[in-house]
Each structure stands twice: as structure tokens, then as C-alpha cells.
Amino acid sequence: MILILTKSINRCFEKNPKFDMTPLLGGTDVVFSSLIHLFSWNPATFLHAYTCLPLAFATRQAAGAILQDVADSGVLFAILMCKHKVISLVGAQKASLHPDDMLLLSNFVLSSESFRTAESFSPICLPRYNPMAFLYAYVHFFDVNTYLMLLTTSSDAFYHLKDCRLTYVHLQDGNMAISSHPYALLGKIRIEAVLLKSNVLSEVQRSMIDGGMRVEDLPVGPLPRSGSSPHLGQQTLTSESPERPREPFIGIGGPAGLWHFIYRSIYLDQYVSSEFSPPLNSLRQQKRLYRAYQRVYASMHDKGIGPHKTQFRRDENYVLLCWVTQDFEFYAAFDPLADKALAIKTCNRVCQWVKDVENEIFLQGASPFSW
């Protein structure tokens, strides 16, 4: 509601408790409905982190360089996204964007059909950034999933932001350089053309087709040496019932019956989750797992009895293993018959795997959020 009206709506109620805000919210029911739906499948709603589209480091760097030139022209935030996933994000100096605002912003854009049909310029309030004032968002879709958002504090900046998107480039020593002055240029190419020429848009399409990390692809090489990274085997896990030794178990999904995992980088405020694999095929099963993640996340961060560093739970649906360090949080779901010792070893492998590919799955160099 603050996203659409700003928190200054409180003043209307202070002056008139019978004030009816319904007319101000006309046509926004689809935005609320979509946001409610997110709480059933998007872990960003409880992790307070955002996720990135998997891309080669050089590709993301190329996208970031283009956005940086746009941001330098007076834009507060320049964001390139694919659905709810960030491709690249650049903010003006000393400006940071909270992950919760990222979630609200992407939901607002994706649930509003008008943004897809034409270039749009809309007032929008980001509650974590400034709940009392509007920003103004310029939105342009390159294709059905990929879109550019430029945010400014100026209500009359539409044509300036349009010009930012249509910023021109010329060649310097064989390399493309970006400028907002078309008259002094040898050639004129729109930003879309730069994204195409640098293969950013084609790589985005490829990543959409390939998907993200899959538990079936977990490397089975040796674990890192002790001391090179945190090791879950050194932690003391608690269980609701005593564990009996079990035979090594290989279930559907990944090694040791691994079905799914979520890894959250605390410093970056970003997370990565694996693609759903059998037997988590149906939306009902996936929703049930997210509900389980939500409950165990709340339990891990309960200030009354915690916070906890590790937790091991087994019920008729899953084995859930959670691990919180100063650098990351890790949540994994295993087959309910999975062996505890093997599950711990598998979690260590997953964490090392994430570190090995972090340049491809995270936006490196992003400013940490202070909140």
C-alpha cells in the first residue's frame, strides 16, 4: 500500500478517520494479488534478499558497465532484470536499494500489463528507501521477460530517461564508448543494440532456457581442506529424535537424497536456490516445501529462543538441515529417509559448489545494504 500511496496517506486519516482510500487504489488489485501469491513460492519474501539470473561473469560485467553509464547521467537506480531475477543493478553514489523494495518493484512491474505494451513512466514509493515520497520509474521491456528500470526523484524526467535508454555509443580504439551527446559521435546505436552486440540479451535468453543450479549436477569431488571454509561437520546439530546409523542412501534428486537447497549470502543480501527436481514436481509439493522453509527460517531467527546456528529436523515429508554462519545461511531439504551424516557431508559439498561458481550466480561488487 505504501508502494502505491506513500506513508503520507496517514495524514489523510489523521485529518479524517473516515477517509476512503479505495478510489486511490483503483486498478491495483492485480498488484496485491500477485504479491500475495509471491509468499507461496518466492523465498525473497522471508529471506529479505534478491536473486540473480545465472550469467557468465564477463556478461554481467558488460551489463553493469552499460548501466553505470546510464546511472552517471543522473539516474538514481538503473536495474536490468529478467522476471524477478536481477541481471545487473547500479545505484548512484551513496544510494542503496533494499531487497524488499526490489521485490515490491519487480512485482509492481510484472503484474501491470501496461508496462509491457509501451514505454512507461510511473510514480512509485519504495518503503525502505523513503516511505514518505515518490520516486519515478521509467520501464521498458526488451522482450517478454527482460526489462530495464530507471528510477529518479524527478517527476518530469520521462524524456531524459528515455534519452538515457537511447544513449548513443561510438568506437574508441575499436572499443565501444558511451556518450549522451549524439552530435559528436561517429555512429549512433541504441542501448538495446549495445546489449545485443555485447551478447547480454542472447546470454539472458540462454540462461532462461538452461535454468539455474540443479541438485543432480552437484560435483562429487573431494571436499575442501579443513580450514579453507566453514565446515558443517564441526557444528553440533540438534534433532527431535536420536539418530540411528543408516546405510548410505541415494534417493530421487541429488546425492544422499538431496531434493532442494537455498543459499543466502549475508554480505551481498543475495540468495540462490536450486531448480526443483523430482519428486518435487507439482506446485503443491513446491508450495509445501516453501512453507517448511518459512517455518524453519523463523525458528532459526527466533530471538526468544535463538538465534540458532544449526538445526536438523526430520518428519514424514523431509529432512531439513539449516546452517547459519557469519557469511551465509544455508537451508536444504532431503528425502525423509536420508542419512544424517551423509546429509551433512552433502551440505558441505553444496556450499563449496556455490563458492566455486559465485561469480556466475551473484552480482559481485554490489553494495551491502545497511538495515
Image (cartoon, helix red, strand yellow):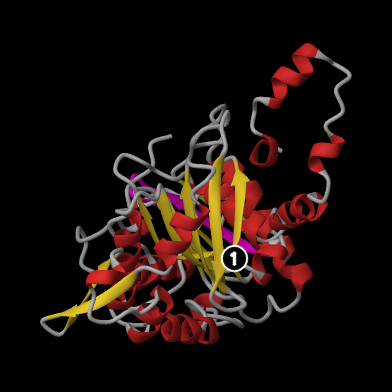
Q: How many marks?
A: 1
Residue at figure coordinates x 68%, y 75% from the top left: 280
State the residue in front, 133 or 226: 133
Q: Is residue 24 magenta?
A: no
* Looking at the image, residue 55 lies above or below residue 238: below
Residue 136: percent from the left, percent from the top? Answer: 54, 46
Quick one: 24 or 267, which is closer to the camera? 24
Q: Which residue lies under the disc numbered 1?
A: 119
Residue 150 appears at what percent x and percent y?
Answer: 47, 56
**Residue 26 found in image quarter:** top right
Q: Is residue 27 left or right of residue 83?
A: right
Residue at 54 percent across and 79 percent down: it is: 249
* Secondary structure of the residue carrying numbered label 1: loop
Is 233 situated left or right of 28 in this image?
A: left
Highlighted magenta segment, given as a residue range: 318-329
Disc 1 residue type? Glu
